[in-house]
Image: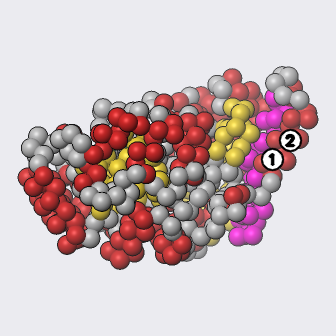
């Protein structure tokens, strides 16, 4: 059954050879995205049947079946259907209303829960699920997965008394690729060796300190903007940046006043404001000072050095006279940074630093390209005095001296229908390892923005603390 499954998956292009960076930041010579499974119910069912097969063959005992959220949920559902077994659902975030339960479904403490996973790498996501189930009194010792990437997952889980059985392993896939002359036996050995090399998900590759806690990073940072932001994060306990995308100064000042206590930065698009004026930025500066937040102009500069120099200091907005931070595209190359360097510390300029756009949140963005991201990171690394970090979707560099700011966050919706892609705070911070969440319409478009500000502030900090502890 597993051979047929491998052939079917291969036919759908699920195995991609190349150079990839996994969620953990680890490099991988092969990428396997089993999420493509769910677009073919036939293959999904085949995988579910194979899982049922190994459950029976190994005589795995269970009272309930639980999928590791989210990718394994459809397959866990099918497994439950085939085995006629009761399913429990593990939530990634407790509901902010009602019962706040982390496990949905009826269960009795002391009974056995069997975990279903799609792909196992280090076993970390499985362990997180096991921990939650065990806290609820469930007995949790067995996991079945579709694929084991052979990256130490089995051993890591063993240490936690969890037994992992998989339908297919990376070796099986590579053997299949050898059999159809797609790779050589030598390449297989190289890939398996590379995958088995222990990985430390930090900056250790570059000899950079490995502590990601904001407190430690605050104590060592050399960058003026990061010092300021981290100071606010620690003092006000907020890693929330509000995107105040209103077109009138009245609305912006109103939300700035309400948001003040809950945010570390207020982000503007000055070019969408109908009645922008020097008195507006003056009032905003007063609010920023009394509430302790940073004023951020999301200009996304991308031009020749000279033009950007004029764009930041002249024209209707004279951005450098009021914004403490701005966004800059890396596309112009070295010219991206130079004009901004001269404004940090310059008389009459408020600029403390900038963020480089490493990856956009929009559907179909060309910034997904790995070389593009690498080039952006290199540019930042060579100019740490002015580049404080990145706008990104996943932490783009294993370097804690930068801050990673991420837009595309909404707890109640996944898209705006105009290309924006939203995901949860847990995903943005814990899974994708960003530091600051940029949230707009989830707050500004809500009937009760203050309640939303509190909700995003609390959830943002909770995720940050959970990530680093
Ligand atoms: O990739 C990006 C980069 C940015 S800075 N995607 C984004 O959405 N942004 C900005 O973040 C965008 O311009 C907007 O101001 C904010 C997100 O707003 P929301 O309403 O979608 O949360």
Q: Which mark is residue 214?
A: none
Number of numbered tags placed on the structure image: 2
Q: 53 and 280: which one is in front? A: 280
Is 301 placed left or right of 393 in the picture?
left
Extent of the magenta region: 148-177
Beta carbon of the mark 2 residue lies under 8 A of ligand 1 = no
Q: Residues within 10 Å of mark 2 (few under 14, many from 20)?
A: few
The reply to whether residue 294 is in sight is yes
Image quadrant occupied by the N terminus? top right
Q: Please tell me whether residue 150 belongs to the stretch shown in magenta.
A: yes
Image quadrant occupied by the C terminus? bottom right
Q: Residue 185: x percent and y percent? A: 91, 33
Q: 164 and 410: which one is in front? A: 410
Q: Secondary structure at mark 2?
A: helix
In the picture as drawn, the residue positioned furthest to the right comes out as: 186
Which residue is depicted at the point 81% across and 24% down?
182
Q: Which residue is mark 1?
A: 194
Whether 332 is drawn above or below 440: the answer is above
Q: 248 and 303: which one is in front? A: 303
Which residue is depicted at the point 59% across and 46% down?
378
Q: Residue 368: x percent and y percent? A: 52, 36
Q: Secondary structure at mark 1?
A: helix
* Label 2 with label 1: CB-CB less than 8 Å: yes
The reply to whether residue 415 is in sight is no
Which residue is depicted at the point 55% across and 45% down?
379
Which residue is depicted at the point 70% across and 63% down?
207
Q: Which residue is mark 2?
A: 190
Q: Residue 352: x percent and y percent? A: 37, 59
Q: Residue 331: x percent and y percent? A: 48, 34
C-alpha separation, residue under disc 2 versus residue under disc 1: 6 Å
Q: Please tell me whether residue 97 belongs to the stretch shown in magenta.
A: no
């Amino acid at each position: 059954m597993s051979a047929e499954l491998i052939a079917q998956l291969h036919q759908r292009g699920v195995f991609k050879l190349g150079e990839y960076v996994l969620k953990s930041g680890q490099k991988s010579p092969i990428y396997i995205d089993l999420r493509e499974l769910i677009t073919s119910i036939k293959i999904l069912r085949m995988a579910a049947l194979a899982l049922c097969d190994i459950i029976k063959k190994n005589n795995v005992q269970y009272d309930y079946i639980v999928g590791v959220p989210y990718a394994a949920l459809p397959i866990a559902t099918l497994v439950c259907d085939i085995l006629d077994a009761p399913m429990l659902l593990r939530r990634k975030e407790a509901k902010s209303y009602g019962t706040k339960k982390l496990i949905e479904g009826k269960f009795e403490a002391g009974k056995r829960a069997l975990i279903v996973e799609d792909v196992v790498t280090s076993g970390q996501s499985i362990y997180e699920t096991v921990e939650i189930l065990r806290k609820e009194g469930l007995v949790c010792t067995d996991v079945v997965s579709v694929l084991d990437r052979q990256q130490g997952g089995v051993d890591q889980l063993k240490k936690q008394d969890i037994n992992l059985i998989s339908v297919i392993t990376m070796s099986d896939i590579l053997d299949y690729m050898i059999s159809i002359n797609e790779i050589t036996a030598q390449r297989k050995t190289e890939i398996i060796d590379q995958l088995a090399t222990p990985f430390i998900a930090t900056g250790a590759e570059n000899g950079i300190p490995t502590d990601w806690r904001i407190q430690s990073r605050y104590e060592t940072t050399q960058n003026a903007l990061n010092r300021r932001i981290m100071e606010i994060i620690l003092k006000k306990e907020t890693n929330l940046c509000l995107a105040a995308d209103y077109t009138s100064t009245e609305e912006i000042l109103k939300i700035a006043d309400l948001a003040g206590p809950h945010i570390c930065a207020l982000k503007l698009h000055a070019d969408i404001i109908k009645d922008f004026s020097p008195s507006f930025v003056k009032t905003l500066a007063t609010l920023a000072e009394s509430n302790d937040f940073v004023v951020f102009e999301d200009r996304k500069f991308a031009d020749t050095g000279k033009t950007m120099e004029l764009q930041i200091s002249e024209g209707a907005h004279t951005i450098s006279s009021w914004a403490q931070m701005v966004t800059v595209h890396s596309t112009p190359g070295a010219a991206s940074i130079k004009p901004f360097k001269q404004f940090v510390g310059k008389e009459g300029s408020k600029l403390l630093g900038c963020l480089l756009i490493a990856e956009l949140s929009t559907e179909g963005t060309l910034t997904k390209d790995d070389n593009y991201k690498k080039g952006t990171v290199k540019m930042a690394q060579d100019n740490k005095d002015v580049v404080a970090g990145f706008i990104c979707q996943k932490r783009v560099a294993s370097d804690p001296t930068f801050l990673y700011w991420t837009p595309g966050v909404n707890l109640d919706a996944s898209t705006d229908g105009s290309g924006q892609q939203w995901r949860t705070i847990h995903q943005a911070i814990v899974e994708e390892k960003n530091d600051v969440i940029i949230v707009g319409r989830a707050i500004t478009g809500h009937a009760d923005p203050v309640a939303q500000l509190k909700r995003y502030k609390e959830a943002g900090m909770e995720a940050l603390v959970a990530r680093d502890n």
